């Protein structure tokens, strides 16, 4: 299993780089470009915007807010 799957803590740039390497987008020693990071954040924002349609249940934080908080800003 990928070490970044099913995380409950926030992910950092190194985690995003591991995901990109696993997808074949980065070489072993390569770092995320600002453009690839911006793309990744846009995809996550789109996912969070889908979750915006669902009201929070037992906490003050919605699923969308939680998704957004999990990635580096």
Image: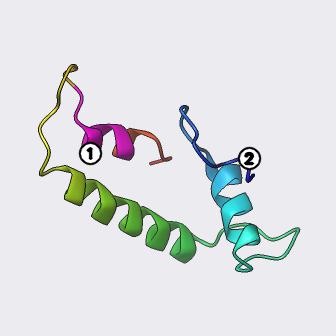
Dominant SS type (magenta): helix
The reply, left or right, for residue 38 in relation to residue 25 is left
The foreground one among 34 and 46 is: 46
Q: Quadrant of residue 23?
A: bottom right
Residue at the image position 68 percent from the left and 69 percent from the top? 20
Is 13 drawn above or below residue 17 in the view shown? above
Disc 1 on helix, strand or loop?
helix
Report the magenta residues as a range: 61-67
Q: Position of residue 25 (x, y in %)?
A: 70, 80
Which residue is pictured at 37% across the width and 45% down the height?
67
Judging depth in this view, the residue of 8 and 41 nearest the camera is: 8
In the image, which disc is placed on residue 64? Answer: 1
Task: Decide if residue 28 is on the left or right side of residue 8.
Answer: right
Name the residue: 75% across, 52% down.
1
Are the residues at dot 1 and dot 2 in contact (C-beta closer than 8 Å)? Answer: no
Residue 3, which numbered label? 2
């Amino acid at each position: 299993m990928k070490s970044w799957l099913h995380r409950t803590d926030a992910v950092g740039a190194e985690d995003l780089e591991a995901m990109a390497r696993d997808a074949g987008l980065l070489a072993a020693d390569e770092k995320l470009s600002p453009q690839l990071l911006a793309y990744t954040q846009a995809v996550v924002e789109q996912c969070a915007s889908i979750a915006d349609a669902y009201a929070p249940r037992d906490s003050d934080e919605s699923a969308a807010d939680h998704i957004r908080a999990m990635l580096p800003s």
